[in-house]
Image: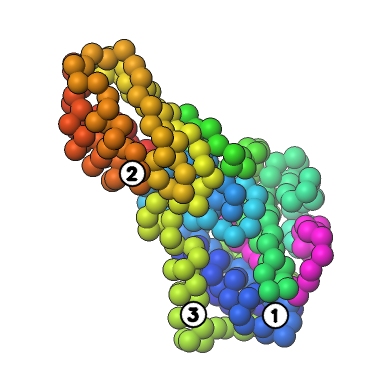
Amino acid sequence: MIYVKFSSPDVSLNLAAEYYFAAERDLGEDVFMLWQPRPTIVVGSFQNIHEEVDVAYAGKRGIDIVRRLSGGGTVYQDEGSVQFAFIEKREGDIDFRRYLEPICTSLCELGIDAEINGRNDITVDGRKVSGNSQYRVAGKTVHHGTLLFSVDIDEMERATRLPDYKIASKGIKSVRSRVCNMAPLTDKVKTPEEFMDFLAVRMTGERVYEPDEAEHERISAIAEEKFRAERHGNLSLKSPKFDFEKHLPFDGGNVIIRLMVKSGRIETCEVKGDFFTNMGTESLIRSLLGCEFTCESVFEAVKNSGFSALGITAESLAERLSEGI
């Protein structure tokens, strides 16, 4: 097994590097990778971002949101976490234990009493320290996971807390687990960087491959194509169809807006409440139908709808409805 030395704070680049060495660049042997990210929420392939992430909070805090190609639940990562990946020419049934066992063995060498728990987690005293997922491409298995070393757990819980609207969808929901960091559990490595160095040597010895400039350029292109579409634009683009409902209290009454979103656009719209208006809600509904489900587009649609009610202006409604999208 060879260690591919590629680590970027941009998670989309790391995911693209995984894909590149699985689907396009065969090094002739199994690959191991490690990286440290900046604060990022990574959602599974079949998840609804709006159901998993407080999007408004993430935006205010500068937390990236990225969708990976594998299934499984939502993961918060930051500089205190270490991400790892195995790339192996292998087909057949999904097998998490094959890749978790060497990680567990390495953690135990650091004095961390780690064990495999359930189908895809590593735990210490019943608390989760690693979540994992897999996908297949070009006859290879890509197994990737996160290791909580000194993660900001308060920020993790806040950023993945459900915001103040209701979502109903057929997306796969994350199972919230008790988590803990491993830094207090070992005195053999002091920092995430030391932890990475230990794992790299433990898994591959001194055998290292570093991508050249042309490979970096190709990895950047893959990141743009496969992992940045939602980050740059509509976060609902790849989410399953879902219903979005938000209750908006104003001095002039309560407005309840329910939307059905499919492929990133509003397909149906219903407006209810105990507000007072002489103009009805038809113009508001017309403006929202077909609108992209993004903060900017929803704000402009409502603002330009001409809707007004007692104590409620189109602009005030636009601000409240678009907040958090």
Q: Amino acid at mark 3?
A: Arg
Q: Earlier in the sequence, mark 2 or mark 3?
A: 3
Q: Residues within 10 Å of mark 3 (few under 14, many from 20)?
A: some
In front: label 2 or label 1: 2
Location of mark 2 (residue): 291
Q: Nearer the viewer, residue 265 or 105?
A: 265
Q: Quadrant of the C terminus?
A: top left
Quadrant where the N terminus sits is bottom right
Locate residue 93, reporting x and y percent: 82, 60
Q: Which portion, as a residue range, is magenta?
A: 80-102
How far separated are the C-alphas under marks 2 and 3? 34 Å
* Residue 32 in view here: no
Rendered view: 13 above or below 115: below
Could you tell me which residue is drawn at 41 percent across and 35 percent down? 268
Q: Amino acid at mark 2?
A: Cys
Determine the image quadrant of residue 81.
bottom right
Task: Report the residue at 64% width, 64% height from top.
Answer: 84
Q: Which mark is residue 2?
A: 1
Residue linked to disc 3: 218
The residue sitting at 70% across, 41% down in the picture is 127
Q: Is residue 51 left or right of residue 303?
A: right
Q: Residue 79 appears at what percent x and percent y?
A: 50, 58
